[in-house]
């Protein structure tokens, strides 16, 4: 069994395009005729990606270009992979904070990794392949 896993989740192009169109309509409605800003926003939104990787020593996650962090596996007290309710639990997608669930990095997936650290802090990360991620995390935590 392989003890490493990595995945990357980005903003779907259709969502970035929809934001671009809505922002363009809004700016045209208020009389703003410089369209370079919507183009810059479209590029920034389409570049944002959540990268999650795990190996035998640590869990790493980053949201380009804002966050880059790692959690040693020895600092993970418990973890659970379950269905994600982005609107219900976090009021949307992106980098979020919930008093009950801690910091969350929510992107367009159905499942998430819910972590509790030994310090008591909580963390939620969107993941795509829950079975593979769970098997690697379970294997590395028991070694």
Image: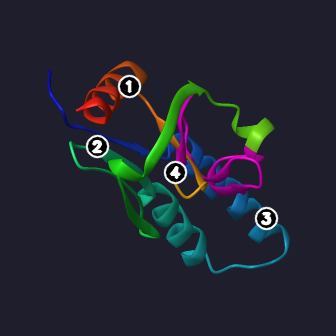
Residue at position x 69%, y 47% in the image: 101
Residue extending furthest toward the left = 1
- The boundaries of the magenta stretch are 90-117
- Dot 2 or dot 3: first in sequence order is 3
- Dot 1 or dot 4: first in sequence order is 4
Alpha-carbon span between mark 3 and mark 1: 43 Å
Residue at position x 56%, y 68% in the image: 41
Left or right, 40 with respect to 19, comes to left
- Dot 3 or dot 1: first in sequence order is 3
Q: Dot 4 lies on which element?
A: strand
Image position, residue 56 (x, y; %): 20, 42
For label 4, the residue is 117
The label number, if any, that marks residue 54 in the structure image: 2
Alpha-carbon span between mark 3 and mark 4: 43 Å
For label 3, the residue is 26
The quadrant the N terminus occupies is: top left
87 or 16, which lies in front?
87
Q: Which is more foreground, mark 3 or mark 4?
A: 4
The quadrant the C terminus occupies is: top left
Q: Main secondary structure of the magenta part?
A: strand
Alpha-carbon span between mark 2 and mark 3: 42 Å
Q: How did the renderer colour the structure? A: rainbow
């Amino acid at each position: 069994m392989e003890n490493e896993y990595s995945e990357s989740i980005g903003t779907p192009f259709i969502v970035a395009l929809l934001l671009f169109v809505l922002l363009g309509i809004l700016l045209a409605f208020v009389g703003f005729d410089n369209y370079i800003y919507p183009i810059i926003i479209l590029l920034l939104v389409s570049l944002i990606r959540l990268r999650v990787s795990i190996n035998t020593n640590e869990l790493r996650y980053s949201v380009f270009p804002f966050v880059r962090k790692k959690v040693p596996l020895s600092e993970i007290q418990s973890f659970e992979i379950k269905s994600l309710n982005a609107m219900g639990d976090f009021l949307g997608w992106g980098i979020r904070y919930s008093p009950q669930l801690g910091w969350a990095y929510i992107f367009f997936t159905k499942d998430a990794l819910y972590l509790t650290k030994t310090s008591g802090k909580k963390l939620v990360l969107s993941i795509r392949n829950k079975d593979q991620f769970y098997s690697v995390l379970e294997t590395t935590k028991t070694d």
